[in-house]
Each structure stands twice: as C-alpha cells, then as structure tokens.
Amino acid sequence: RAPVPAISKLLRDPDTDVRQHAVQALKQIGDPQAGSVLVSALSDADPEVRHEAFHAVDELKIPVAASLVSKGLGDENADVRDQIVPRA
C-alpha cells in the first residue's frame, strides 16, 4: 500500500531506464509524498532521468528551490534546459 517508498528505491538502481521509469511512475501516481523524491531526481547523473524529473515536478506543480532550477538551466543537455524554460 506504499507505492512511493517502493518506487523511490528504484531511483538508486544502476540502470538508467529503471530510474527513468521510476520517475514516470511517481509522476503518474501524483502522490504529494513523491515530491521530495522527484526533486532529488533532478540531480541524477543521467540527463534523461533529469529531464523526466523536471517534467514531473512541473506537471505536478511541486515547488523547486531556485538553486535547482538554476542548475537545470545550466544543464549540458538541451532537453533538460528546454523542460525548464516555460513554453509560450
């Protein structure tokens, strides 16, 4: 009955695809408990995971510290940067 803690453990998996799917699952669940977990995924080593995490925190309206947004805007991956910039 506690999907967020179980899925959160997958964010430590060495497989990038597993971590990316974990972020997607947390976004779909939409549980407020997932907020801090998704924010931690913003610092993942893989750009695809970071991209998914920024998408999730945006879609779920999770408050993110300005320092993390700034870090994302400076990300080497264009997809990550594009996820942060509001669409007009």
Image (cartoon, grey):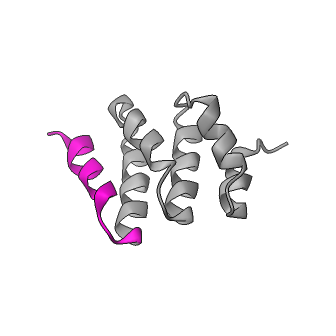
Report the quarter where the N terminus lies. Answer: top left
Residue 24, position as x, y percentages in the image: 43, 55
Most extreme residue toward the right is 88
85 lies left or right of 36: right
64 lies left or right of 83: left
Q: Is residue 80 above or below residue 56?
A: below
Residue 18, position as x, y percentages in the image: 34, 67
72 lies left or right of 11: right
The mark tally for this picture is 0
- Magenta range is 1-16
Q: Residue at x 40, y 34 (%)?
A: 36
Report the quarter where the C terminus lies. Answer: top right
Picture quadrant of residue 77: bottom right
- In the rendered structure, does residue 55 fall within the stretch colored magenta? no
Q: Is residue 26 above or below residue 30?
A: below
Q: Residue at x 47, y 56 (%)?
A: 44
Q: Residue at x 33, y 55 (%)?
A: 11
Residue 33, position as x, y percentages in the image: 33, 31
- In the rendered structure, does residue 7 fall within the stretch colored magenta? yes
Camera-side residue: 57 or 72? 72
55 lies left or right of 17: right
Q: Residue at x 47, y 40 (%)?
A: 39
Most extreme residue toward the left is 1
Name the dominant secondary structure of the magenta segment: helix
Q: Is residue 80 above or below residue 32?
A: below
